[in-house]
Amino acid sequence: MNVLTVKDARKAFGEIKALQGASLELRQGELLALLGPNGAGKTTLIRAITGRVRLDSGEIRLFDRVLDGARTPPELGIVPQEVAVYPLLTARENLDAFGRLQGLSGGLLKDQVGWALDRTGLTDRADESVQRFSGGMKRRLNIACGVIHKPKVVLLDEPTVGVDPQSRDRIYDMLADLANQGVSLLVTTHHLEEAEARCSRTVIIDHGRVIASGSLSELVEQTVGRHRLVTLRLDGPFSPASGDVSDFAIDPADPRVLRARMRDVALELPPLLAHVNRAGRIVDDVDVRGPSLQSVFIHLTGRELRE
């Protein structure tokens, strides 16, 4: 079931075409990654969904209801890229304030504040001023304030930027907990390894258009293919034995390293190992890597730097 649908979204700021027909679907209970280079249109799309930007054309539906952009729907939770909490208040006071702004009160508000403090690992720092918090703690509180009212759909713009690995894990554990409760989450990030490990599907946007979407296996099949990169590190420089022919490359910077692309590692690796053996070398290490989300992303968007 699609809870959020964006169809043919278009938006220009003067001569700059930020969105040029972008479309995507977010399913119930899904953690969806929205990826793209700088300036690809990610933030504009998020702002359009939240009503902060009015589209020139196109349609956005939330639970099959067309959003007119006049206000942010109560079913929607928003976690901006900039930390948007009150630094002079405590964590508890921030959560209480944001909860009240979202219409919570009484026992429900108290329960939600307790849940948010527990899930973000801030219970023991709940009554300290936020200005004394680390960057990771502020990020976690920022997310908690965006979901305190139990929204059904949450939009997160770069929620883990600039945080340590421990905070990053805590944040994604919190998001996974929400997804398990049926909440749908759309996350923009430049951390491709996070998206690959934590998100069930990925949407890649560039130049204002969605250029690919699907699970990692689907994206790999559509783009770079399912070959594995096999790297052998030998005990010394490799010189092929006379008459040996094999589809591999010797690293020009280090002749002890061999690389080969293999579709079937079980079938294709033994002949390469035999070549190494005939050359009188010993394999010190073997590394087999499958196609990654990063390889798909670079294949689709290129290596050119974006400003």
Image (cartoon, helix red, strand yellow):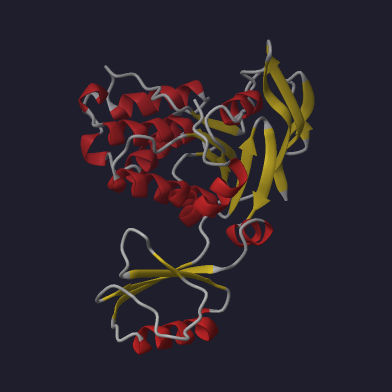
Q: Residue furthest front?
A: 242
Q: Residue at x 53, y 61 (%)?
A: 291
- Quarter of image, res 255: bottom left
Image x and y of residue 59, in percent: 78, 29
Q: Residue furthest top?
A: 14
When the figure is inspected, residue 18 is found, relative to residue 169, above or below; the finding is above
Image x and y of residue 296, in percent: 57, 52
In front of the other: 160 or 244 = 244
Q: Residue at x 60, y 31 (%)?
A: 40
- Quarter of image, res 133: top left
When the figure is inspected, residue 66 is found, relative to residue 288, above or below; the finding is above
Q: Residue at x 74, y 28 (%)?
A: 9
Image x and y of residue 300, in percent: 62, 46
- Quarter of image, res 263: bottom right
Q: Residue at x 47, y 82 (%)?
A: 269
Q: Number of labelled discs? A: 0
Q: Can residue 43 be seen? A: yes
In front of the other: 37 or 273 = 273
Image x and y of residue 239, in percent: 35, 77
Q: Can residue 31 be seen? A: no
Whether residue 134 sits left or right of residue 108 in the image: it is left
When the figure is inspected, residue 140 is found, relative to residue 180, above or below; the finding is above
In front of the other: 279 or 72 = 279
